Image (spheres, rainbow, N blue to C red):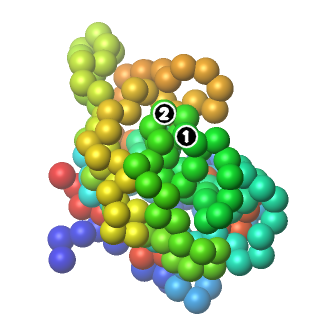
Amino acid sequence: SDALVLFDGSNLQQWESAVKAGEAAKWKVENGYMEVVRGTGAIKTKAVFGDVQLHIEWSSPTEIVGEGQGRGNSGVFLQEDYEVQVLDSYESKTYSNGQAGSIYKQSIPLVNATAAPGEWNSYDIIYQAPAFNKDGIKVRSAYITVLHNGVVIQNHQEIKGTTEFIGLPKNPAHGPRSIVLQDHGNPVRFRNIWLREL
């Protein structure tokens, strides 16, 4: 009852382009969900956040195209830099720290709880933001717990820094920032997105 609804299935008023500042989000909205429109870029919340409990549901395409990272790929980024991977990992192989529910390139999920393509998955994320001192030095790492379809797959896991595709995590100082949903070129769907600030 105290949650902030970020997407109720009707519009993208809480979201904007993460690529072009101030521009409206250009993803498709229909039948109670939003869907990535390839090439329009990632979208982010207009509001910024620190510590949160986030609920988000996602579905990979029923038409299976590609393999591994090319199959139903997207991501949920906390504070714009820390990715919980979204991927069709149902009977599909990819590198272990890039599968659904991984803290991308950092932490392998405890179990693969991914539903079949076209079915809805849920992530319930409890996130504690990193802390930085007045000199911009990190004094506390971010920590994350993730339940995937009700199953604990990340248990108070330390996030070592930004979730880089290549290279080591970085730790630039920051305060509250947006939640970002990734456009990786696949028509992944999202619905029922809400959060509570902690």
Q: Earlier in the sequence, mark 1 or mark 2?
A: 1
Nearer to me, 189 or 92 = 92
CB under 8 Å between callouts 1 and 2?
yes
Q: Residue at x 57, y 42 (%)?
A: 96
Can residue 80 be seen at all in this image of the molecule? no
Residue at the spot x=24%, y=61% of the render?
Answer: 196
Quadrant holding the N terminus: bottom left
In this rendering, position of residue 126 left or right of residue 188:
left
Query: Is residue 130 shown to the viewer in this render?
Result: yes
Picture disc at residue 57: none
Name the residue rendered at 63%, 32% in the picture.
Answer: 165
Residue 7 in picture, x, y percent from top left: 44, 73
Is 173 located above or below residue 16 in the figure?
A: above
Residue 153, above or below 91: above
Foreground pick, 82 / 66: 66
- Residue pointed to by mark 1: 97
Which sits in the foreground, 128 or 155? 155
Judge the density around disc 1: few (<14), some (14-19), many (≥20) Cα neighbours within 10 Å: some
Q: What amino acid is found at the position of numbered circle 2 in the picture?
A: Gln
In the image, residue 120 above or below residue 99: below
- Residue with the most extreme bottom position: 31
Residue type for callout 1: Asn
Residue 61: x %, y % from top left:
69, 73
Between the residue at mark 1 and the residue at mark 2, the CA separation in whole angstroms equals 6 Å
Tell me the SS state at disc 2: loop
Q: On the rendered structure, is 198 left or right of 108?
A: left
- Viewer-side residue, 43 vs 91: 91
Q: Going 29% across and 46% down the picture, which residue do you hit?
A: 155
Give the percent coordinates (x, y) of residue 134: 24, 15
Identify the mark at residue 106; answer none if there is no mark: 2
- Residue 15 is situated, as x and y percent measured from the top left of the image, at 50, 62
